[in-house]
Amino acid sequence: MKLILKYLKPYALIVLAIVALTFIQVQTELTLPDYMSRIVTEGIQYGGITEEVPLAVTAKDMDIILGFMNENDRNTVLAAYYPVTKGTKGKIDKQEVVFQEDVYLLSQDYLFPADVPDLTEIMRKPLVYAYLAEQNGMDLSKETDLPIGELEEKAKGLEDNFGSMAKLYNSALYARVGLSTQKIQSSYILSSGMIMLGIAAIGVAVQMLSTYLSARTSAKIAAQMRRDIFEKVESFSSSEFSRFSTSSLITRSGNDITKVQQLIQLMLRMMLMSPIMGITAVIKVTRYPGISWLLIVAIGVIVCAMIVLAVFAVPKFEVIQKLTDRINAIMREFLDGILVIRAFNAQKREEQKFDEINSEFRRTDRFVSMVMNIMGPVMTLVMNGLTVAITWFSARLIDIDAMTIGEMMAFSQYAIHVVMSFMFVTVMFFMIPRSLVSVRRIKEVLDTKNTILDPENVKTLPAENGTLEFEHVGFRYPGAEESVLEDISFTARPGETVAFIGSTGSGKSTIMKLIPRLFDVSKGKISYCGLDVREVAQEQLHDKIGFASQKAILFSGDILSNIVFGRDIPEEDLQRAVRISQSENIVSEKEEGLHAPITQGGTNVSGGQKQRLSIARALAQDKNIYIFDDCFSALDYETDKKLRSALNELIQKTKATVLIVAQRIATIRNADKIIVLDDGKIVGEGKHEDLLKNCKVYQQIAYSQLSKEELA
Amino acid sequence: MPPMRLAEKPKHFKATLKQLSAYVRPYYGRILLSLVLMVTSTVMCIYGPRLIGNVTTLLSQGILAKYKGEGGIDFVRIGELITFILIIYSISALIDYVVNILHILVAVDISYRLREDISQKINRLPLKYFDGQSHGDVLSRVTNDVDNISNNLTSTVSQVLNSMVNIVGVLAMMILISFKLTVISLIVLPLSGIIAALMVKKSQKHFSDHSKYLGKINGHIEEMYSGHLLVKTYNYENKSIEKFDEINKDLYQAAYKSQFYSGVMHPLTGFLQNVGYVAVCLVGGFEVINGNMLIGDIQSFTTYVRRLQHPISSIAQLMNTIQTMIAAAERVFDLLNEKEEEADSSEPVSIYDEDGNMKIEGNVTFENVRFGYDPDKIIINDFSMFVAPGKDVAIVGPTGAGKTTLVKLLMRFYELNGGAIYVDYRNIRDYAREDLRSIFGMVLQDAWLFDGTIRENIRFGKPDASDEEIYEACRLAHVDRFIKTLENGYDTVISEDTSGISQGQKQLLTIARAFLKNPKILILDEATSSVDTRTEQLIQDSMEELRKGRTAFTIAHRLSTIRNADIIIVLDKGDVVEVGDHAQLMEKKGFYYKLYNAQFEQV
């Protein structure tokens, strides 16, 4: 997690912008139900009227309303309204109107009742009484004594609904003033609709912008991370490489990075969104304390369901993974051993073995799926049940006007948002730890300290050839218990060919790798021209060495690019390298010559050809030391011989040092010095004839390859 | 949002579908039942919002009546309705679960069947098939492809149907509420479909770019890491990083563009959805005012409009899933439809006498044998030879000369392109394969052992062997002592990560296995150079022991070890160039002579 934050840091501003945009987006999204609620409640039910205090009242109606008030209130109300005579033009709530009767208009000051007495409390009851009277067909204008007692009786139990009733009555009042109530209603609904559209438009714009920013940022961070890890790995020595293994490093630089990129994208979009959405929705929901407890119940049920799953099914997932691995392993066994299985007529037995695991897989898979699939229906049921429950419990609130119908509809929508966000967060909790595994794996690589570094004060190697010297060199792999090499000492002078032979695991290749500091010695020292290899710059050291590895490696490109390998190589040297390495016929065989394509891993050339081209690469530049790590074994005797004699000619001229690791006695019997290794120790050193006489291991190797008479 | 994958297109959609349906056929009854149940539940589910809308209408009417002093909310009626809705929802959830279970059981069974079929098929395929196939590819068919089929086969069908029932049902409900509103919301729907399609088209290029560059950069990473030794020693790091940066830049561009386009599709269609929502609220509002609609209808209608979105977009997605699934099925069936090994002869020659003992002497005749892995590239042209029982035959020649091929033909792993091979004067085609192969014992250079104990691995040679027989075989193979030095002895488990058993020792175990089988004819592939000197001596000794009294074909890699062979066959480029014993061949001064001397020549 820290690592991700570190990478996010340079983009803090953008992340902040995304947070802000997400916030706006959530607000827009959650405001829409509010407006829907307004359309339903105020727009449809109350005829588009939002105010309890009428803006205009005919003189007749005013009289009746005033009739329900005491002296004091009557004066307050009269002070708020000013009379207008019949026939004058006026404008109420943006509607032009010619008054058909004498009317009272609410003075402008009272539209903002902050500085003036609030009329709502005073007028509510009288308005409701007048409304009820009208509903019951009483014509109050004709009576002098208002039937207060009767109306009080009727209003009993409706106290909570007075506000809504007042609004409803206003609509009737306005109609008598001469206002078109239909216009009031439709303009209210329309304007609400337009606001909704506007909000939706803002929402989409904001969302697109934040999508753009997050896509860009996550891609950028991934690119940066990918580059960092690649650069880091390129700086590794073989020692760090062997710690991780090549395939693991490839996954870490490829697959893991892709996963992290997805995680960041998810973080920037969903993970910001869900809590903001959830919290905002919760705030909106808590306006109705009477029913918000329903949400807690719904979430509780979901949590229980998830816990049940986590306890029962999730451990089984691991079992399934293991079984899948076993199915794979058995299949691989089938394929790898196909010859043997058929030769031993073991097909039936192997099929039985497969069937056992396959059946077990089927059993487990059935169980897990049956448990896992409870989730879907349960979720749907919870969601649907929640909506139903909200409707039921809201009905009670609506009855006492503690909630409107529109608000109930909006509430259902918020509730769904809350539950969804909650679910998402929960899913995140399951998902993030998995993605964090990738992050951890990347971090491990990035945090690895390189063990092979250039010294602070590098010494410079002389240009001419020098002597390579091993002094009591010992080596063990980091963390290993046993040494691979012990007390290795030898010298290789300019113009000399030194050969190494010994059985597998005797440490031949390791010695070769120590020279260019792919590993550092654990004991003793290696020096060239009298300088410890650890005192010179690695780059300069590498420039002195032509290296052909045990396993020939070719890169995708063409023959030329594989030999040149990023260096400046004059045509002449190139031709010479091709000639000495016996690669001429590989080149001439191909239509495109040197430009013949090579596929990744060199799969389109044979093993021997690969080896020769990799030798050509080592020979393409004049070097002071050439290392051939067992790369002649893949060549046939004929080619091996030709190559060595061409190489000899070159060495005669340049007086370079040649180190050869070989398995065939024939390859090395003419070396100036043969070093025989066994189990990491030098057990013999000298010329072929001497070793045949006095080195037991050498004799054994030799006799397994040649017969006595031939060796004599 | 995970990056979208481009769906692979299957090549033979119909044929694959037909074959797939053969697997589904036994479950038709269950599937039909599940479909009926599913439609029932969907219809019930669709009815829910309408009922809730009715509750809302009741509420609204009740409260208005209350205002007018004409009554109030009818809680009894509402209570009844709510209970009814809850019952409907519960039943439908229950049915959904039952449907899911039905589907899963079918899917799990089918994937089980497919895996079984593949595993059996593999044993019936000619070896030839595997020459052109990477193991990883076959493995991926067993796991990934079968998983894909199993995950999607039943669920996609039901989801498509579910979506369609939903669409029809929801549309019907919408029309029932208000035709006008339905028309209005239907104008918005195709619009969002068009936008989605445009976006997909626009992003397609970026997606394919993305996977292209991703492949390229992973390729580069893989190459550079596996060639790290060279990158280091040739100071190639900077060049490599330069190249990496180039690809990474392209990758970044493609990554953010593809993510942006796929990410922006959602808000855009969401906006249109909101426009539709607003339109419904507005028009619906007026309809209510004019008395054409009830207030609860707005509520149910908006719910329906939202419900309609989901199945439409999911159908589009399902089409992709189905395509990928069929492509996966196609790969599986490609394997299952591969031509199998030729059937055994209908009246095979028995290799046993009346007492049930093997009556084979072990003589082998090659008669004008002609063979090529690819019929156009014949590698054994015309090879004839008679090998008397108990003779020791060595096959030599440079790598790739076809040495191993000859013995593979002998055991009838491949069919000849011409000529015939006889064992005890009977064409090998006249024997049942199982019988033929039980005549032979085989020790390969690349010692194959399976995950299991040493005991199990050796018993592989003779399933009914007693422990005593196993120990005896191991003693003969000179591996008994070594096994006893292991902590768990014969019960040591051999697996990929077993340490302490070298390649050479593994080969000794396979020799023990061959001893246990006690075959008439032996095929031995000598150890490579990757075996230490002492173990190699052991291997030579035990092979020598094993050869005694049997006809043996030894593929030799070292000329020095075969000089005592009765017959030496020299192969070059697939042709038998010389046949004879060592002395004869040296005298001939031909290819063998040259080969033999090459290793001693002075440079």
Image (spheres, grey):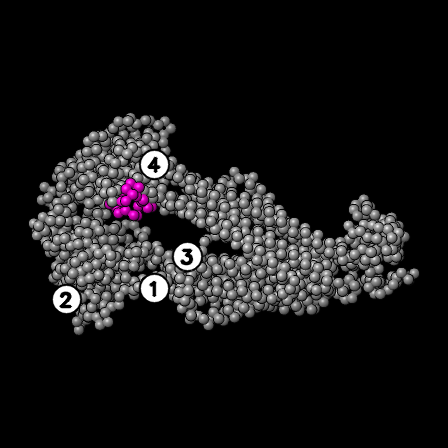
Q: How many marks?
A: 4
Q: Which amino acid type corresponds to the residue marked 4 in the rendered image?
A: Gly
Q: Position of residue A38 (x, y in %)?
A: 70, 55
User: Residue B131, located in which quarter of the rendered image?
Assistant: bottom left
Q: Residue at x 38, y 59 (%)?
A: B331
Which residue does the numbered mark 1 point to in the structure image?
A: B337
Q: Position of residue A670 (x, y in %)?
A: 16, 37
Q: Residues within 10 Å of mark 4 (few under 14, many from 20)?
A: some
**Dot 1: chain letter:** B
Closer to us: A656 or B535: A656
Left/right of residue A639 with respect to residue B133 in the rendered view: left
| Inter-mark Cα distance, 1 to 4 | 48 Å
Q: Which label number is shown at residue A321?
A: 3
**Dot 2: chain letter:** B
Q: Residue at x 44, y 47 (%)?
A: B209
| Inter-mark Cα distance, 1 to 3 | 29 Å
Q: Which amino acid type corresponds to the residue marked 3 in the rendered image?
A: Gln
| Inter-mark Cα distance, 2 to 1 | 35 Å
| Inter-mark Cα distance, 4 to 3 | 44 Å
Which residue does the numbered mark 2 point to in the structure image?
A: B425
The reply to whether residue B484 is visible in this rendering is no
Q: Position of residue B312 (x, y in %)?
A: 54, 60
Q: Residues within 10 Å of mark 1 (few under 14, many from 20)?
A: few
Q: Which amino acid type corresponds to the residue marked 2 in the rendered image?
A: Tyr
Would you say the residues marked 2 and 4 are in contact, meaning their CB atoms lie under 8 Å apart?
no
Q: Could you tell which of marks 4 and 3 lies nearer the N-terminus? A: 3
Q: Residue at x 25, y 50 (%)?
A: B502
Q: Residue at x 28, y 46 (%)?
A: A605
Q: Quadrant of the C terminus of chain A?
A: top left
Task: Determine whether the residue tagged by mark 2 lies in a helix, strand or loop.
Answer: loop
Closer to the camera: disc 4 or disc 3?
A: 4
Which residue does the numbered mark 4 point to in the structure image?
A: A566
